[in-house]
Image (cartoon, rainbow, N blue to C red):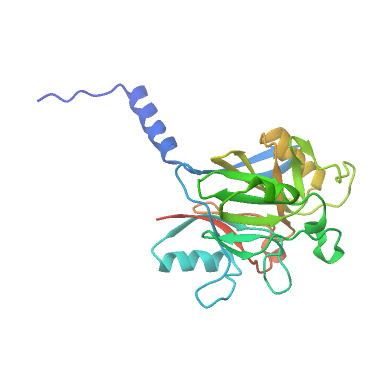
Amino acid sequence: MKTRRLPLPLLVAGLLASAQAAIAVESRDLRFDATGYRVVSVDLKRETLETHWRDADGNPFATIDALRHWGEAQGRRLAFATNAGIYDSQFRPLGLYVENGRTLRPLNTVKGNPRAGNFSMQPNGVFAVGRDGRASVVATGDWAARGIDAEIATQSGPMLVVDGRINPAFDEDSDSRKWRSGVCARTPQDVVFAVSQSPVSFHAFARLFRDELGCRDALYLDGTLSRIYIDGDGYAGAPPMMVKPYAAMLAVFDE
């Protein structure tokens, strides 16, 4: 029996296509306006995005490494993780938090509380994935009316981009710069996370999401301590000496 061999260009193209098809969590580095960022896209048609806060004993996982080790004990490989938003001094999410369809923290509608820091900047919002597998970023004031049956959700603030417009509270000339992380749902199945590799202003970070990543609505997750973990690539974002314990985290596990 004779075996038909494919021409080398076709063989290479086929291998590349297979490799691309296997990528459901895509990580890349980019530069935008002279600032470096790590950007991660999660394809919800092929991967499940999860929220994780506390272990079986009720203690916050606190670190991505702890979450990774927990996953390994369950026979699960951590493919991606990042901090899920702003939290209080008791390591509790400061706003709405939903895990496995259960609301563990209620929607926070308090405005102008200086102790809430960036969370209280308006509008703030919610990132959620519904039980139907559709992701969205919604301003807090619109959350109830949207009637989303959330499988996971995290509330944070401020919104970076609202309906295609940069949050008007941001000053383009601000000299307040920090490591920052955020999220958007570019489509209902295409979730995009980004973390800055150096300190950046709110306005510049919002422009990344709107002008470079093509997001009409984007939510700030946190700053200073923010990091993204990708299996095989390690960490990006804030340097180790800036990192403090987290509360909730967003993650993708490969079974």
Where in the figure is residue 117, as x and y percent of width and height? 82, 61
- State the residue in front, 8 or 117: 117
> Residue shown at 86%/63% (left/top)?
114
Q: Which corner quadrant holds the N terminus? A: top left
Q: Position of residue 12 (x, y in %)?
A: 37, 28
Looking at the image, residue 169 lies above or below residue 17: below
In front here: 208 or 113?
113
- Residue 89 is situated, as x and y percent measured from the top left of the image, at 73, 73
- State the residue lying farthest toward the left: 1
Q: Residue at x 86, y 46 (%)?
A: 169
Quarter of the image that includes the C terminus: bottom left
> Left or right of 235: which side holds 22?
left
On the picture, is 86 further left or further right than 69? Answer: right
Residue 209 appears at what percent x and percent y?
Answer: 70, 39
Which image quadrant for residue 106?
bottom right
Does residue 164 appear anywhere in the picture? yes
* Front in this rendered view, residue 216 or 204: 216
Can the viewer see residue 39 in this picture? no
Quarter-wise, where is residue 208 in the image? top right
Relative to 168, 212 lies left or right: left
Horizontal arrangement in the rendering, residue 100 relative to residue 215 (left or right): left
Which residue: 57% across, 63% down?
64
Count of numbered badges drawn on the protein: 0
Front position in the image: 187 or 247: 187
> Farthest residue toward the bottom?
57
